[in-house]
Image (cartoon, rainbow, N blue to C red):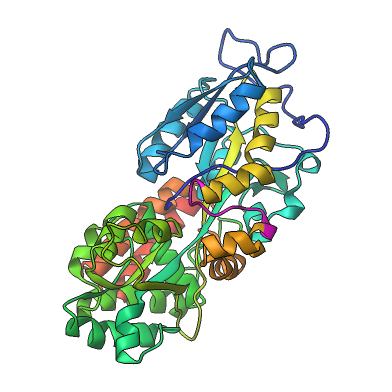
Amino acid sequence: MPRSRALRRALVAGTLVLAGVAGACAPSGRTTDTPDGRGPLTLVTGADLSGYLRGVLDDWDRSHPAEKVTLVELPQAADEVRAQMATSLRSGSDRYDVLNIDVAWNTEFAAAGWLAPLDAARFPTKEFLPPVVNTATYNGRLYALPYVTNAGLLYYRKDILDREGDKPPRTWSELEHLAKTVAPKYGLDGYAGQFLPYEGLTVNAAEAVQSAGGSFLADDGRRVTVDSPQALKGIAFLADGVRDGWIPKEALTYKEEESRKAFQDGRLLFLRNWPYVHALAERPDSKVAGKFGVVPLPGPDGPAASILGGSNLAINAHSRHKESAAEFLGYMTSRAVQRQVLTKGALPPVWADLYSDPALVRQFPYLPTLRKSVLAAQPRPKSPRYEQVDLAIQAVMQDAMAQRETPAQAVARLARELHAIAARH
């Protein structure tokens, strides 16, 4: 999340069944499944900011009166959502049947045995954008279905750049130059992302590091790779931006919504955020409605490697209604519901062909840009100990951007901390 979380559907042929879950253990004193694996469901998710989800669930309830879905909404902040889900799953509770999880948690939750594996052949994942399917796998098996995808975008004040005769930046140096020279002329701050120490800071840091050609961990989550010139370049880009003033110090307190409001209130020239911002910034009460544009994030020498965001739908390994849950996953990720996720929830779908649908492109003109960003996006560090990795990156990046450590000191410290985490793998 960093943010933004919603639900998607998949057209499923025949009866949806799960593979390898019949023997999943349940809490003491309870059977694993009901005799047919069917029954009412509970879906747990982060806050539904757009309010579209209840309508989607009502459609399911009408056609499945014996398998109605109870919706449990947790707080908005991704860190709090993860903590509450993990506490329930760790205890072996079957309270939640279906979980709407951030794509970064898939490896951690699957490795812990909290998710029931899915039969990939039962779901039309070939219709999805290819990178999103990778977020739902662990050790070569599918443990969730992609539901919503996301990639960071650069929002910019088109009216101001047009007045100055400038184009939106494609590189870090162009971004820095415009943020330093144009923004002050109009009484604006230069650039902001999500820099409060939470999941959003990890996303912003990973985008900078990976765009520079670096990484925090190897794909297996065991080998530490952050001690490199490329990682140093990415961390320095953000830290030096605060030092030099084109990233305002106030941005160190921003999450998604704070940064969106700063841009929407006309206080920023450039904003890194998710696609959900577009619809809100075009509302009549927005000071930038009709005045902004959207382009891919800039990188050192061209478009950046955005971080793949979004959420996956997974089944609790302790659910007693896995058959109903599997069918529900198919419903939520079907093409028809995917369309509603976009049109009613303003959240990016996982079905590839929706990005070239003429009617949708007219309504959501950023879709072609978003598709390019998603296809070029990279995942956050994969690790069974993702929570610890996440916290380490947040703490170090906070100190680097607050000028308490130099970028070189931050890289060295982060390497030490990640080595200690990896050693406990």
The residue shown at (55%, 68%) is: 373
Q: Is residue 335 left or right of residue 69?
A: right
Q: Position of residue 347 (x, y in %)?
A: 50, 51
The residue depicted at 54 percent of the width and 51 percent of the height is 342
Outermost residue toward the left in this view: 187
Residue 348 lies in the magenta-colored region = yes
The answer to whether residue 122 is above or below residue 355 is: above
Residue 317 visible (yes or no): no
Res 357 → quadrant: bottom right
In magenta, the rendered stretch is: 344-353
- The chief SS type of the magenta part is loop
In the drawing, does residue 36 fall left or right of residue 379? right
Question: Which quadrant of the figure has residue 222?
Answer: bottom right
Q: Is residue 118 above or below residue 35?
A: below
Between 207 and 67, the residue placed more toward the observer is 67
The location of residue 293, given as percent across then percent down, is 41, 73
- Tell me: residue 56, above or below residue 223: above
Residue at the image position 37 percent from the left and 87 percent from the top: 174
Which residue appears farthest toward the right when viewing the image?
14
Query: Residue at image x 64%, y 20%?
Result: 25
Whole-percent x, y for residue 27 in the image: 56, 15
Residue closest to the eye, 405 or 302: 302
* Residue 96 belongs to magenta span: no
